[in-house]
Image (spheres, helix red, strand yellow):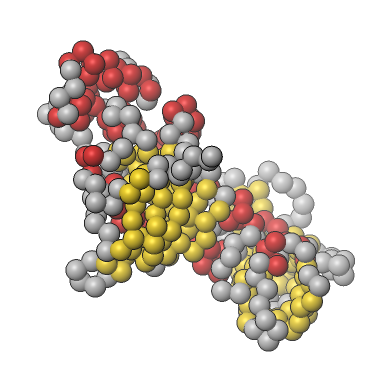
């Protein structure tokens, strides 16, 4: 018999007193030992959902389950979860050890056990030599580690993290991403991580729920979300995508013929990104292709590729890569990204013209 989910939402909803529907009938399951991300723009409902998991918000409908048990009416301090807040919320008048052990002291854990567990928690986050320090003597990354230790010292079944890296600078955020993944793999408990940063979610999570307007738009592993998004929203929120409006002319036997003002007639078939987006004949769709899949050439490409002639209108340098923005014959904006270590002839000034092309199998059909 398979183990129950570590955490589950069953038709979970939250409507606030002002009428705002923050979470709208969300259902999902998080497996034991899974690193799970809730990803979406500000105001999409991801933090409200996390707070309902923690018991800090009361659902308007549905239920929360932890290891198969209904926890919807259980008080926050009686749930086998703990939460790391965006602001860290450390007590400034307590030492690091005092902050970490505070929850145990409230629970009247014996002093000897408390000291042992605090030492274990600090060792888990590599802060064992900082127990006597005060929070104001720590860096942002060190405070984050203390907040993690405080959450872990009670040995939760699920750790909830509400944008815990947002206050850190870029270099420290990258280091803490790796640290969180290492810690989660070592502990083997479920982490539920809220973020609006797609890079964080893609690089850390086993699976990601992409949220918008209180609903989960797609739930999948990072590669599936990137290679086979199920909607315009997911395609443009996860990475960048060139979108071309089009109409389904016909489809049969796993192939689809699409008419686009920007691209002409396009025949596709076979890939999950294509088949997943097939609409009825006559229906409107969007064709998407990722910027790194687009080639730039001075000579006209082979007929097997999808191609357009386009004019360069903008160059943006990002250090490790450069982004080139073109206008196609119908005014469609097409973005190309190239690593700066790569070779090849590249446009150098606005107004340069190039053939832009890509393989048919690199296209994604989006019906929504």
Q: Nearer the viewer, residue 170 or 148?
A: 148
Q: Position of residue 325 (x, y in %)?
A: 61, 66
For this view, does 60 lie left or right of residue 316?
Answer: left
Which image quadrant is residue 363 in? bottom right
Is residue 44 in sight in this rendering? Answer: no
Look at the image and tell me whether residue 100 can be seen: yes
Camera-side residue of 318 and 114 = 114
Q: Is residue 30 above or below residue 42?
A: above
Residue occupying the far front of the picture: 1
Which quarter of the picture shows residue 113?
top left
In the image, residue 91 above or below residue 330: above
Query: In what quadrant of the picture does the C terminus appear?
Result: bottom right
Closer to the camera, 109 or 196? 109
Against 44, residue 283 (above or below) is below
Residue at the (20%, 30%) spot, across then down: 103
> Is 307 displayed left or right of 21 in the figure?
right
Is residue 167 found left or right of 229 in the rendered image? left
**Count of numbered circles on the image:** 0
Q: Residue at x 79, y 76 (%)?
A: 252
Q: Position of residue 344 (x, y in %)?
A: 77, 52
Expressed as whole percent of the image width and height from the top left, the position of residue 72 reads: 28, 52
Location of residue 89 in the rendering, given as x and y in whole percent from the top left corner: 21, 39
Residue shown at the point (46%, 50%) measured from the top left: 29
The residue located at (78%, 70%) in the rendering is: 254
């Amino acid at each position: 018999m398979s183990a129950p989910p570590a955490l589950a939402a069953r038709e979970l909803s939250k409507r606030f007193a002002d009428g705002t529907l923050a979470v709208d009938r969300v259902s999902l399951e998080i497996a034991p030992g899974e690193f799970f991300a809730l990803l979406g723009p500000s105001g999409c409902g991801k933090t409200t959902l996390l707070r309902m998991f923690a018991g800090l918000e009361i659902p308007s409908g549905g239920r929360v389950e932890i290891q198969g048990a209904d926890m919807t009416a259980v008080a926050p301090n009686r749930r086998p979860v703990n939460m790391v807040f965006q602001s860290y919320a450390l007590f400034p008048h307590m030492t690091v050890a005092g902050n970490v052990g505070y929850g145990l002291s409230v629970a009247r854990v014996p002093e000897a056990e408390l000291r042992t567990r605090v030492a274990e928690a600090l060792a888990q986050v590599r802060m064992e030599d900082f127990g006597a320090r005060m929070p104001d003597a720590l860096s942002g990354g060190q405070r984050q580690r203390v907040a993690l230790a405080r959450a872990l010292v009670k040995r939760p079944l699920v750790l909830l993290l509400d944008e815990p890296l947002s206050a850190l600078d870029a270099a420290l955020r990258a280091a803490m991403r790796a640290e969180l993944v290492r810690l989660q793999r070592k502990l083997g408990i479920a982490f539920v991580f809220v973020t609006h940063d797609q890079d964080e979610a893609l690089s850390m999570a086993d699976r990601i729920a992409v949220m918008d307007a209180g609903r989960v738009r797609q739930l999948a592993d990072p590669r599936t979300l990137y290679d086979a998004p199920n909607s315009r929203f997911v395609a443009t929120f996860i990475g960048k995508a060139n979108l071309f409006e089009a109409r389904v002319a016909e489809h049969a036997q796993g192939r689809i013929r699409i008419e686009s003002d920007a691209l002409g007639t396009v025949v596709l078939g076979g890939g999950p990104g294509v088949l997943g987006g097939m609409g009825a004949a006559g229906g409107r769709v969007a064709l998407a292709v990722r910027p790194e899949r687009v080639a730039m050439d001075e000579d006209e490409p082979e007929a097997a590729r999808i191609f357009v002639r386009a004019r360069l209108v903008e160059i943006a340098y990002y250090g490790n890569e450069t982004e080139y923005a073109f206008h196609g014959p119908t005014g469609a904006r097409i973005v190309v990204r190239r690593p700066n270590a790569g070779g090849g002839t590249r446009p150098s000034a606005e107004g340069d013209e190039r053939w832009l092309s890509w393989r048919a199998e690199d296209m994604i059909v989006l019906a929504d």
